[in-house]
Amino acid sequence: MTEIEGGRVVLLTGATGVLGTEVARRFGLQGARLALVGTDEGRLADAARDAALDGERWRPVVADLRAADDARRAAREAEQAFGRVDVLVHLVGGWKGGTAVADLDPDELRWMLDQHLWTTLNVVQAVVPGMVERRFGRVVALSAPFAEKPAARGASYAVAKAAEEVLLRTLAREVGADGVTANVLVVRKIDTEGERDKNPSPKNAGWTTPSEIAEALVFLASPAAAAINGQRIALDGRA
């Protein structure tokens, strides 16, 4: 694994759950300090415990990133605790779908845009100016193949993820000269149960484990990944 030099400060959103816990654990092993962002302080404490984080090297931040004020407060709390934010790992997601375009409820699309586009914009606007000022920063988010190749009855998700990707790849063009990168990892399905290895099949060959995602995130967050910017990186090489 690539070392995060000097104990980078990571703002990890969507920090609860299997993936968030594994990502927190991997960054913790690299000596990073983490602000874990979620909507439930108890679940954040559980994630930190499961990730074996040292109590002095992490902070819980309870925030709803759909609100710009909450995103700015989350960034402030991380900066107050650790002095800065070097890395933004954005794992907030969600799914609503199964509806044909002709029958699509606008509220469904609004909800998906809130989860994927607006949370991303809000937290990026909260942390990237500081990264630019310090001339170092890493922004990484997860996306899905549907942003490029939408499936039937999945328009809301595909539209929201495509919007998020365009936002981040545009950001990459704007801040690359300032030492800040922004990239997207594309994952077909997160294999939280290890199904790909236990019962291999053509269906799950392209699934990605939380460990594999975490390893990629740690590398993209490192100084060694400075030349990787504005990329859409698919983690499905076994398919």
Image (cartoon, grey):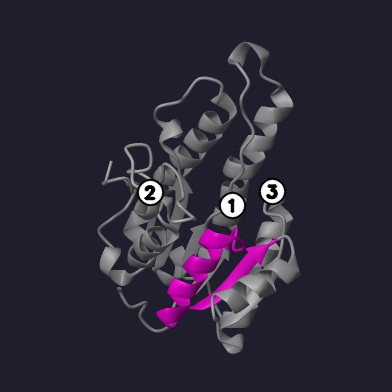
Does the image show residue 202? yes
Q: Residues within 10 Å of mark 3 (few under 14, many from 20)?
A: many
Question: Horizontal and vertical percent for residue 64?
Answer: 72, 55
Question: Horizontal and vertical percent for residue 2?
Answer: 30, 73
Q: Give the residues drawn in magenta, as a range.
A: 13-38
**Which callout, 2 or 3, points at the residue further toward the start of the chain?**
3
**Which callout, 2 or 1, points at the residue further toward the start of the chain?**
1
Marks 2 and 3, how far apart in space?
A: 38 Å
Marks 2 and 1, how far apart in space?
A: 29 Å
Mark 2 falls on what kind of element?
loop
Q: Nearer the viewer, residue 125 or 99?
A: 99
- The disc label shown at residue 199, or none: 2
- The disc label shown at residue 92, or none: 1
* Rendered residue at 74%/70% (across/down): 42
Q: Amino acid at mark 3?
A: Arg
Quadrant placement of the C terminus: top left
Q: Amino acid at mark 2?
A: Asn
Give the residue number, with chain letter if any, for mark 3.
66
